Structures are given as C-alpha cells and as structure tokens.
Image (tube, rainbow, N blue to C red):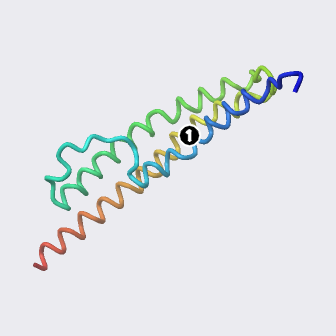
Amino acid sequence: MPFSIAWTEELSRYLFIYMVALSVGVVLRQHRNISVELFHHQLGLRMRAAFQVLICLLIAVFAFLVLPYAWQYAQNGTWQTSPTLRVPMLYIFFSTVITFALLLVYSVLGCVEGLIAMCRSSASLQES
C-alpha cells in the first residue's frame, strides 16, 4: 500500500494483552507456569499435593490482595482514549482485572484439587 495503517500496531498490542490476560488461568490450571522443580522428584504424592496447595494458596492470596487495585487502575481509563483507535482505555486496563480474577478462580480450584489429592493419597496409604 502507498500509505501505512497506523491503528494495526495498536490493535495487535491490545489483542496480545488480552490473549495473555485470558490465558493466565488456563496456564495455572494446567501447571504450565514457570516453576523451579529442584526437589519435586524427591517428594511423595501427598507432599506434592501439599506443595501444590501451598503454591495455589499463595497465588490466591496475592490475586485477592491485588484485585481491588487492578479495578482502581482500570477505572483510571474511563477518561482516557487510545491514540489511534479512540477506544476508551477502560477496556484495555480492564485486562488487569481479568488477569487477577482468573488467577484467583483457578488458584482456588488448584487448592481444592490439591486437597482432594492429599485426601486420596492418605486414604490409599491407610488401605495398604
């Protein structure tokens, strides 16, 4: 084309932000986040489940504490618009709220899953 389309770079940036925001919960749920596994292979099933509960609990507490501030940050965008698309920045800043809400939901699910795994492993140990 003889001219450049200025809004495409901005749209791709915002779509990338939302792609990350929406995938954060799935990544946590599938245990695909970056972690250091120095001693995982040395732990038994019950201790691995307890470790999962601890990590998910820490993530849940962090997400719960940050979520109100993410909402305040998103509200800052109500009177701002994006430079080329003229989209209210509230929609862009709201990705932080989505990120921490999904982290909270999926970390609570991870805690429940870990507690169930701990109970199952202790029940199988008692049967043996």
* Residue drawn at the location 46% of the way across and 46% of the way down: 104
Please identify the residue farthest to the right as the structure is shown: 2
Asked whether 12 or 88 is in front, the reply is 12
* Horizontal side, residue 38 vs residue 7: left or right: left
The quarter of the picture where the N terminus appears is top right
* Horizontal side, residue 30 vs residue 51: left or right: right
Query: Residue 53: x and y, percent?
Result: 29, 52
Asked whether 4 or 68 is in front, the reply is 4
Dot 1 alpha-carbon crowd within 10 angstroms: few under 14, some 14 to 19, many 20 or more: few
Please identify the residue farthest to the front as the structure is shown: 2
All told, the count of numbered labels is 1
In the depicted structure, whether residue 114 falls above or below residue 57: below
Examine the image and state in which quarter residue 49 appears: bottom left
* Residue drawn at the location 60% of the way across and 42% of the way down: 19
Examine the image and state in which quarter residue 97 appears: top right
Q: Helix or strand or loop: what does disc 1 sit on? A: helix
Q: Amino acid at mark 1?
A: Val
Asked whether 40 or 102 is in front, the reply is 40
According to the picture, the residue beneath numbered tag 1 turns out to be 20
Query: Residue 79: x and y, percent?
Result: 75, 22
Examine the image and state in which quarter residue 128 appears: bottom left
* Horizontal side, residue 69 vs residue 49: left or right: right
In the depicted structure, whether residue 55 falls above or below residue 44: above
* Horizontal side, residue 109 vs residue 47: left or right: right
Query: Residue 31: x and y, percent?
Result: 38, 51
